[in-house]
Image: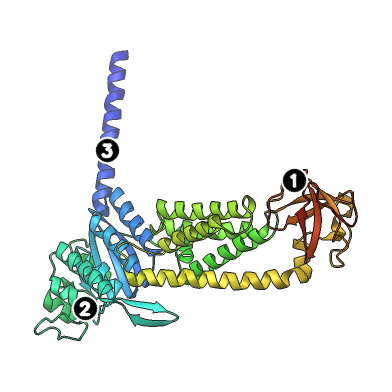
Amino acid sequence: MVTLSYRLLALIALIFTMGTASVAFSQAAKQGPVVYLAQVDGMIDLGLAPYIERVFAEAQREGAAAVVLQINTFGGRVDAAVQIRDAILKSPVQSIAFIDTRAISAGALISLAANAIVMAPGGTIGAAMPVQSSGGESTAVGEKTVSYVRKEFSATAESRGRDTLIAEAMVDADVVIPGVTDRGKLLTLTTAEALKVGIADFEAPTLALTLEKLGLKDAQVVETSVNWAEEFVRFLTNPIVSSLLVTIATLGIILEIRTPGFGIPGALGITSLGLFLYGHWIVKLAGVEELLLAGLGIVLLLVEAFVLPGFGIAGILGLLALLAGLMMSTLGEGFTMDSLFLAAAQVGASLAAAIVISLLLLRFLPKTKIGRQLVLDTGLTAKQGFTSEPLSDHALVGKTGVAMSVLRPAGIAEINGKRVDVVSDGGYIEAGQPIKVDHVDGNRIVVIEILQGQTQFGDRQ
């Protein structure tokens, strides 16, 4: 009887399991295939590439039937378009470019990378000659840049079985195609023209009709959007923001080197530098080499500021390494001399701005109320054993004392029984050595070492 009951329960469980599986299978069949939809609109920048890469990776992981790129853009950065192009070509998921109005410049390269190109009525594609933007104006680039971009278009078209000459004519006005475009005219195709030359596969006014013609009528469309992290990266890699971060980072480092201790300028500089490198690391502009160069530059500058007196080899090498790391972080793959000069100009302008601002701050900030709170103030240090004598009347000039710490060149000395922040006159002074106040420069007490046997006049300790 017990054996019969066990068999009956097992039979009921088997029927229940088969019924559940059948329901799940019928629901899956009813839902049909899954299609992911990604928006490629507005300016194509470096922050857009991680978004497209994430969509294709998620679509592949979920077994989606296709990824539709709904494109409406006047273009953007070439390196960003190349990253997106690579992500599309490398993905095993079917890609569909639905050109909803226009795919100009970088948008044309992204469209050519898709398995299928569908254009809405009145759409356009092409006009992809690279230009260099500076100060709100666009100028023509050199032949090397044009040649590189032309071959990127040609290789992309070739990989999808499209006419490579048509793709090259979108980039180079010197490409001649009889009956299509003449010399000196950059190729831009309307929807009808793109269908005629075989660049577009078919015309469809809506996404629904596009999916229907591709056999995905009952597909479940999963709409995607840029998340907050990708928006943050797009913000950090914006040319204006990245230039501002470089300026703030350089300014903070300069002010930190010129003032004793470690405070707000240093923290602000390092934070800005970290944000700049982080944003460019995410979009694959900054790699290990760039991070190592920038880190080495910071270390050498710190060595110059706190270990070695003056400004010598370590400081120069540190500045060069930092600038090289920042410049390389603004260059994409396949960079040319045009992009190299543009990166140098961007970093150079940020550096020049930082130097000018730092000179103004170092000159006028100590005279302001806020500036006096950031530096050693005599009124705040009397109870702590530091001198309370005003530095402006040169009361300490000529007085002698002992170096309480190593002066290289900044450090602490004891004068008149009080601990005072001092700076050596360019030399290295060991702790315990007798010193003399040579002069007072603003808020700096400049001292010199008293050599053994040297005759001194004035106050003695």
Q: Earlier in the sequence, mark 1 or mark 3?
A: 3
Which of the image's four quarters has the N terminus?
A: top left
Query: Counting other residues with Cα less than 10 Å from the Cα at mark 2, is it few (<14), some (14-19), or many (20 or more)?
Result: many
Alpha carbon separation for disc pair 1 and 3: 84 Å
Task: Confirm whether residue 350 shows in the render.
Answer: yes
Q: Nearer the viewer, residue 214 or 317?
A: 317
Query: Counting other residues with Cα less than 10 Å from the Cα at mark 3, is it few (<14), some (14-19), or many (20 or more)?
Result: few
Query: Mark 3 = which residue?
Result: 19
Between disc 3 and disc 2, the foreground one is 2
Q: Residue at x 23, y 58 (%)?
A: 89
- In the rendered image, residue 11, in percent from the top left (x then y), is placed at 26, 26
Q: Nearer the viewer, residue 323 or 43?
A: 323
- In the rendered image, residue 319, in percent from the top left (x then y), is placed at 52, 60
Q: Kindly indicate the quadrant of the structure image that contains residue 219.
A: bottom left
Q: Kindly indicate the quadrant of the structure image that contains residue 136.
A: bottom left
Alpha carbon separation for disc pair 1 and 2: 67 Å
Q: Residue at x 12, y 71 (%)?
A: 163
Query: Mark 2 = which residue?
Result: 172
- In the rendered image, residue 405, in percent from the top left (x then y), is placed at 75, 46
Query: Mark 1 = which residue?
Result: 405
